[in-house]
Image (spheres, helix red, strand yellow):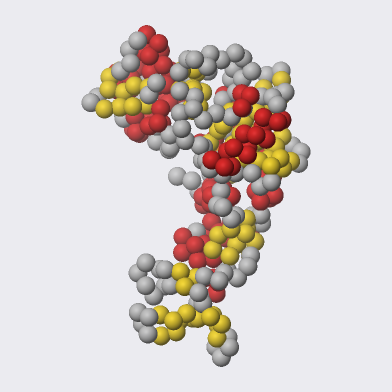
Amino acid sequence: MPTATGKAFQLAIRIFNFEEMRISGSMIADHHSVEGRILMEGGLLSEGEISSWVPNRHTFDGDAVEPEWNEETRTYQYFSFDDCMWVDVPEEDMKTYNLEVDRLVRHIRDLAGLDGEPRGLRGNLLWNLGTFWLGKRKATLFLARRLDRVECFDEVFDTLKRLGNKTPGVVLAWGLPQGRHVELPLGYRMVNLRDALIVEGDSCRLDQEMVKGVLTGAGQPVDDLSPLWSSPDYSAVRVNGREFVFTGLKQKQVIGFLIEAWKRGDARCRTQVVLEEVEASPSANTLSKLFSGRTDWKELIGYGDGFCWLKV
């Protein structure tokens, strides 16, 4: 399970993908008090404007109400029709907290082990975090915001197309666009930040092997007519235009087993045979357990009646 530090970082990324990069004080107080404190102490959250709407804490569903300033009590209040009384608004409910975007972007750059100052490329949608070595050549790491929104994806797509592909590139995003044929231009690849994030104790880091793995074969000719492509170690697989990245050894072995079976014409494999072939541990004696922590494996692997298969 992620530590408080890991959860705090994940909260920051969630706020990063809000339409307005801020969070209410009531949300912090009710659900993220520890994480909020960590983010504020780390300078990733700062107090913003006073909220004009607050939760009604005297109703079951907590509908938002607009408080009024009471000069006599020197407090904000709203009238509770359920209790027929004026209710003081807790100070925290009036607060909002803004995400310090530049700090967060630099923090993600640091997690990736990159140097230099990140460069904004498209307003608050796309950043160039820096370059890293991929064998004897350089690759570029980008960070995108709200990439799973069609309008945002289109803007990122157009920006990358204008940049060209002098070096291969990976775009990190918290949440990727859905669809079987959604791809970035010119060979750029996408990686879900939630899958690439590694939490170890009180520290977080970016899985650089995952990032490099998704670029395996980048710049090489790819048969666009083939519905299935994979890197040699099965850490990256593309099915019907959708890219998946895996870092767990047993996960890659399962993917490799299913890929080779598909190539032989064996579309369906007995799940128990697959798990025995990869020598899955007793604690990972089902596909759900073996892929625990992943959010997308069911979009790649179908299963039922004791069989499993790639959704090619």
Relative to 136, say whether 191 is above or below. below
Name the residue: 71% across, 18% down. Answer: 136
Please provide percent x and percent y for residue 164: 70, 26
Q: Quadrant of residue 255?
A: top left
Please provide percent x and percent y for residue 230: 50, 18
Specify whether 211 is left or right of 84.
right
Q: Is residue 199 visible to the viewer in this orientation of the structure? A: no
Please state the total of marks drawn on the protein image.
0
In the rendered image, the quadrant that contains the C terminus is top left
Name the residue: 55% across, 86% down. Answer: 70
**Residue farthest to the bottom?**
72
Q: Is residue 134 visible to the viewer in this orientation of the structure? A: yes
Specify whether 58 is left or right of 174.
left
Q: Quadrant of residue 252?
A: top left
Relative to 31, say whether 211 is above or below. above
**Residue farthest to the right?**
116
Name the residue: 33% across, 19% down. Answer: 274
Name the residue: 58% across, 86% down. Answer: 74
In the rendered image, the quadrant that contains the N terminus is top left
Please provide percent x and percent y for residue 30: 46, 64
Instruction: Report the front residue among 32 and 168.
Output: 168
Specify whether 294 is left or right of 161.
left
Instruction: Report the front residue among 200 and 78.
Output: 78
**Residue farthest to the top?**
264
